[in-house]
Amino acid sequence: MTAKRDSVSSEGILWLQYIGSLGAALLLFMTGMSGGWTSPFIAKLTAENSSLPITLDEASWVASMLNLGRVVGAVPGPISVYYFGSKRTMVFNGIPCVVGWVSMIIARSVDWLYVGRFVIGLSVGMCYSSFPLYLGEISSPAIRGALVTLASIGLPVGVLTGNTIGAYVSMSVFAWISLVPNIIYIVLFIWLPESPYHLVRTNKIEEAKVSIAKYNPRLDVNVEVRSIQDFINESQSVTLADKFRELNIPENRKAGIIVTLLYFFMQFSGMSSFIFYLEIILTNGGLTVIPPATMVIVASLAGILAGFATIYLADKCGRRTLLIVSSAGTAASMIALGVHYVLLDANFDPASLQWLLILSVIFYEVFLYIGLCPVPNTVLSELFAPNIKSMVACLSGVSLSLFSFVSSKTYQSLLEITSEACVFFLYGAVAITSLVFGLTVMPETKGKSLQEIQDALHKK
């Protein structure tokens, strides 16, 4: 929403905005389950008694196929937002997940695992290039950060659920369970109203008024429609060439670089490697005081609690502060984990080092979900005018997917040519770079309407 006059007050909770955010959280929950599937099932599939034995190289591809699918899925997501609307696109996001999990149910060879993971990855790619646009269009400035953060919590909750269920059930049972939230999600978004921005952009003014009244009953719908019309018309590009030219003006180019770098920091500070390989990391680290599979669950739970705290902090502390704190904590956690492996290589007693391994992993999860994970999605929903937002989301989604694929696929390769310590020190160095970026470059958008953010970027 463009208006600044809808701050949270005694007039009541904007229930439909929160329901939309919870729907997006359910989509990210499904994404998290597909990521959480990896840690327990890679361990099972590579075990000697595996019912479907695969090699370590095949395991690397099974893990990475999800992110390869993301690269492809990132393209149609924002295009669909522009032509069909963000709400319908959210419905479309659920369809590849259904196909992917069915493929996992009938999987009898590693090839079917590749197919299932790739198709689910299509949905993940569409998700990250569309849900920030949807929430940015339906949310009020005063709670936009909280809504995007609430949605982002779905990811660690899904990872935790995947890690927990995957430790106790077969692959086909896991897939059947995963279909349940998928169906609920599709039904929910069929019911939710379309974004008023898309309805105004397609000249469906009366439907836009109904949508505004449902998402924010406090607003004068006629005033809000005119505000949205002015916002869209003021930055309207006609052709694709116009959009590229506008994207290349200094303000938009800077905003695009900011979002791309935020996604780079998110992935190359170790996020995908932790989600996919944490159980193996803990096992190789000599964890015995608690089963590695259980520790994965504990760490995921810590990330979830941090995410819930961030719902409150997002619009209190601001995006920039959260990024700075998150980057500093993530860097310290990765460096501590690297030190743990250095000490192991120096023949220190693994039993005496387990406290360092456990604390490093827990603090990493906490600090990751305070800022590095939710902030990029929040900023993507805020920094761009509607006429280029879909294009930016497409480019950002492709970048995020490529970063995630490269990060997860190169993890095993880096271990073969260096060591665990070197890999974690590298992740720590990226987090330190993110800290410097937050201190020197990152803008603050807390509490500003989309129009105010555009005015600030263009210095009106």
Image (spheres, helix red, strand yellow):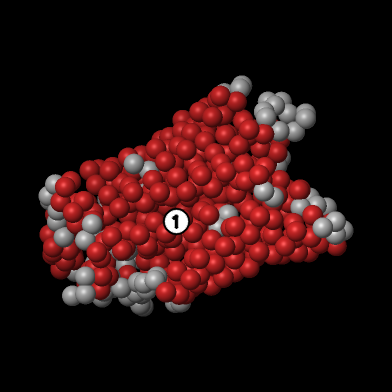
Q: Which residue is mark 1?
A: 263
Q: Name the element at disc 1.
A: helix
x and y percentages locating residue 92 in the rendered image = 36, 39
**Split into 4 quadrants, where in the image is the N terminus?**
bottom left
**Split into 4 quadrants, where in the image is the C terminus?**
bottom left
Q: Is residue 129 above or below residue 136?
A: above
Count all numbered tags in the image, as a single digit. Answer: 1
Q: Is residue 398 visible?
A: yes
Q: Is residue 351 visible?
A: no
Left or right of residue 17: residue 309: right
Tell me where residue 262 sits by quadrant. bottom left
Q: Is residue 313 above or below residue 215?
A: below
Give me the residue at 59% from left, 69% from top: 329
Left or right of residue 66: residue 6: left
Say few, some or many: other residues with alpha carbon within 10 Å of mark 1 (under 14 / 14 to 19 / 20 or more): many
x and y percentages locating residue 452 in the rendered image = 25, 72
